[in-house]
Image (cartoon, helix red, strand yellow):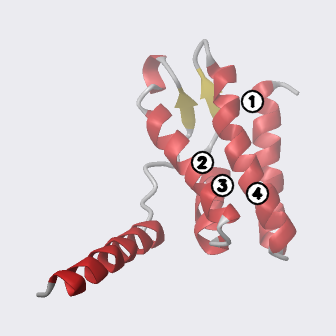
Amino acid sequence: MSKKLFLLTVPLLLLAATVKAQGEYKMTGPYEVVARDGEYRASKAGSERDMKAALDFAVKGQYAEAQKIIDAYARTLQRFDGHDAPLCCIQAYWLVSAMNTLKLKVKSEKLKIVCLAIERTLLSIFHF
């Protein structure tokens, strides 16, 4: 392979790998309980990745991918736990931002129902 061809091929292979990786996101959750410490601390990293991925997908216009994550957490998430549970507001913010992005871009009754379910869960978790 010539050096020029090699230099042209490598960026294309890297781009293909990146696109493939984005299209095949594997959730580590959803989790019923998310915590930064204590009994459920193992859920911290995975739930953060999932909720941030939902926002990233929504912002990039990959609405189906974002909605998969939102749907999964809407069906499953019950509470945030631990003495620093309020810090989980950060990842909850990502999930709510993803929902709001989808609500503006995707006209779907199912999405509205899912968003209301997550909003109710978050409000009860944080006692607003």
**Is the residue marked by circle 4 packed among few (<14), some (14-19), or many (20+) residues within 10 Å?**
many
CB under 8 Å between callouts 4 and 2? Answer: no
Q: Please give the name of the residue rendered at 61% of the width and 57% of the height, measured from the top-left corner.
A: 56
- Residue 50 horizontal/vertical position (percent): 53, 50
Q: Is residue 49 left or right of residue 78?
A: left
CB under 8 Å between callouts 3 and 2? Answer: yes
Q: Earlier in the sequence, mark 1 or mark 2?
A: 2
Q: Which residue position is annotated with label 2?
A: 51
* Quadrant for the N terminus in the image: bottom left
- Residue 30 horizontal/vertical position (percent): 52, 49
Q: Looking at the picture, tell me which residue is in the foreground, 17 or 30.
A: 17
CB under 8 Å between callouts 3 and 4? Answer: no
Which is closer to the viewer, label 1 or label 3? 3
Which is closer to the viewer, label 4 or label 1? 4
Q: Which residue position is annotated with label 4?
A: 99
Q: Secondary structure at mark 1?
A: helix
CA gap, disc 3 and disc 4: 8 Å
